[in-house]
Amino acid sequence: MKPNFRSTSGAALMLVIIPIFVGLLACMPEYVPLGNPERARIDEGMSGMWYSDGESELFGYVVFLQPWDKRTWLVTNIMIGESDGADLDQYETEFDASTYEGFIDFFGQPDLDEDDLEFGALQYKGWLAKLGGETFLTWEIRGVVDQPDKLLEPWFWQDFRVTERAPDRIVLHLIDTEFPPIKEAPATKRDWEKVVRKYADDEALYEKDAIVLQRVKEDDIDFFVELLNKALLGPIM
């Protein structure tokens, strides 16, 4: 299956940061990086292309975990959302944001109008750390995809517990910054790691909602690549 688009403007869809996500970044609580990327080791089984269901105006996420070296990943997080003024009622296939198959069905239908879509992407440096018997994944923001020469200072991190690792599924839980011992601790790597080691097996340390990554099936890789190329690069003239 190949994704299909109908372009009403004929212009390439420029890569932008989805306003929702920009707002999210602006109000995210303060995190600190866990572990040491210079001493970390990636899990090759986590490398590859993953899909995660969206919420609100977001259709979903496509996450690339690309080994940068034996210690870290280059993480590219692509957000696919509904553009302002989008008319989704015109399509025969109703979008089902709850399943991987629903995403495939919606974007594989004929005459999908790219003007109804909005894409954004951020890149991170990612690494693993083991604390208190649990494995954690830290993302450190590094740049905006449409400005590859403009790296960002690592002012923003996200720390996840890797709750489940399987060949075709990863489950992550973000650390809850409202957890009292975390909230009361100074925002330093040493103090956070002390708290995390002590409470690593306490479910109250983590956000309740899981982030579930489903590996993109081998038969669908071309579909996702073509979808993203078409949306991010526009039509080849």
Image: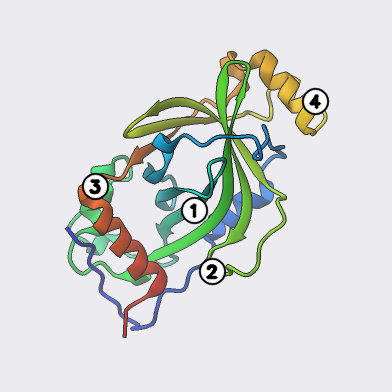
> Is tag 2's residue or tag 4's residue first in the polypeptide sequence?
2
> Is tag 1's residue or tag 3's residue first in the polypeptide sequence?
1
Q: Which mark is residue 76?
A: 1
Amino acid bearing label 3: Glu
Local SS, label 4: loop
Residue 208 horizontal/vertical position (percent):
52, 25
Labelled pair 2, 3 in contact (Cβ < 8 Å): no
How far apart are the alpha carbons under marks 1 and 3?
19 Å
Q: What residue is rendered at 72% in x and 50% in y?
A: 155
> Is tag 4's residue or tag 3's residue first in the polypeptide sequence?
4
Camera-nearest residue between 50 and 9:
50
**Residue at the extreme right:** 186
> Is tag 4's residue or tag 1's residue first in the polypeptide sequence?
1
Q: Is residue 121 above or below residue 179?
A: below
> Is tag 2's residue or tag 3's residue first in the polypeptide sequence?
2
User: Label 3: which residue?
Assistant: 218
Q: Tag 3: Cα neighbours inside 10 Å, few (<14), some, or many (≥20)? A: few
Horizontal arrangement in the rendering, residue 102 relative to residue 21 (left or right): left
> In the image, which is nearer the foreground, mark 4 or mark 1?
1
Q: What residue is rendered at 54% in x and 47% in y?
A: 69
User: Label 2: which residue?
Assistant: 146
Q: Is residue 81 above or below residue 113?
A: above
Local SS, label 3: helix
Labelled pair 1, 2 in contact (Cβ < 8 Å): no
User: Label 4: which residue?
Assistant: 185
Q: What residue is rendered at 58% in x and 16% in y?
A: 133
Labelled pair 1, 3 in contact (Cβ < 8 Å): no
